[in-house]
Image (cartoon, rainbow, N blue to C red):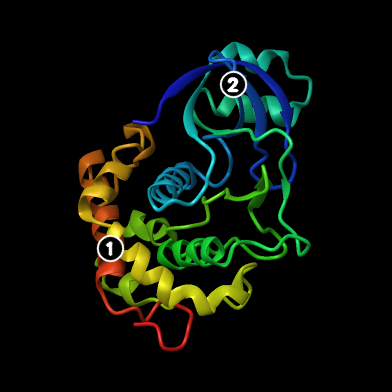
Amino acid sequence: MIRTVPATRYVAPLREGGSLPGLVEAEDLGTYVCKFRGAGQGLRVLVAEVVVGELARRLGIRTPELVGIELDPVIGTYEADQEVQDLLTRSIGLNLGVDFLPGSFGYDGGYSPDPRVAASILWLDALTANVDRSWRNPNLLIWHRELWAIDHGASLYFHHGWPGGVGSADRFARQPYDASDHVLAAHRGGLPAADARLAPLVTRDVLEEVLARVPDGWLEPVPGAATPSELRSAYVEFLLARVAGERVWLPVAGAR
């Protein structure tokens, strides 16, 4: 499982998104952007963050370290903002921490990314059906002159339908990815090369290793997958089906 550290202080809210993440200091002296289990999107967003973030790391895409953040009930009692206090109270237990990159800044049109890196990120987003990497919300940072991918909670949309039953991976395997609004859409020409380079790395062993990083308590039972082990297997099968089949999901003409 991802490394777990207790939170020692809630620092400040980050009000960029509806989930109201916050800066948190932890016992390891690190500072993290905390994604709270009590936010409206639910635990599946935290699962997607870990699955896609850890897969990105194994594909050579820069993404901050992920940790589990344990929140003690006492932390919320010192928060004056009632909205934040309510969120902290709902989030007692294990949350997700994303390593804070001091001095980083958001991606904009003034930065020219390495085409290979840009195509790799676009390929990962297409594989995992990430619907949240547009110019409105790039979810990319520049740190030490390198491009870093963050915020993968809007990926793996298929698991939001699992409360009705896991079902078959075949539909997801063929679902096209719409990159028309993607912040890196100009790099679609690099997708065939990215696919040839990255697809062989997405093996069953790698996916099982990635899913093992997800805490058991975030894997909510659904019909057809009642245990954390069964849920992990379902994620593996869905992603394997997509990477093993025809590349009808790649948003570029001529991709296999």
- Pick the quarter of the image with the C terminus: bottom left
- Pick the quarter of the image with the N terminus: top left
Horizontal arrangement in the rendering, residue 122 relative to residue 25 (left or right): left
Q: Residue 188 location in percent, x, y? A: 53, 77
Q: Earlier in the sequence, mark 2 or mark 1?
A: 2
Label 1 Cα crowd, 10 Å radius (few <14 / some 14-19 / many 20+)? few
Q: Does 69 appear above or below 256?
A: above
Tell which tag, 2 or 1, sits nearer the viewer.
1
Label 2 Cα crowd, 10 Å radius (few <14 / some 14-19 / many 20+)? few
Query: What residue is drawn where x is 67% and y is 32%?
Result: 22
Query: What residue is drawn where x is 48% and y is 63%?
Result: 120
Looking at the picture, which amino acid does disc 2 mark?
Gly
Instruction: Work out whether residue 110 or residue 22 is closer to the camera in this orientation and state it.
Output: 110
Q: Residue 48 location in percent, x, y? A: 44, 49
- Asked if residue 224 shows in the view, the reply is no
Horizontal arrangement in the rendering, residue 175 relative to residue 89 (left or right): left
Q: Secondary structure at mark 2?
A: loop
Instruction: Work out whether residue 145 or residue 80 is closer to the camera in this orientation and state it.
Output: 145
Q: Secondary structure at mark 1?
A: helix
Query: What residue is drawn where x is 73% and y is 32%?
Result: 13
Looking at the picture, which amino acid does disc 1 mark?
Pro
C-alpha gap between disc 2 and disc 1: 35 Å
Q: Does 60 appear above or below 182?
A: above
Residue located beneath label 1 in the image:
200
Q: Residue 64 location in percent, x, y? A: 54, 39
Task: Say which mark, if any, is on residue 230.
Answer: none
Residue located beneath label 2 in the image:
30
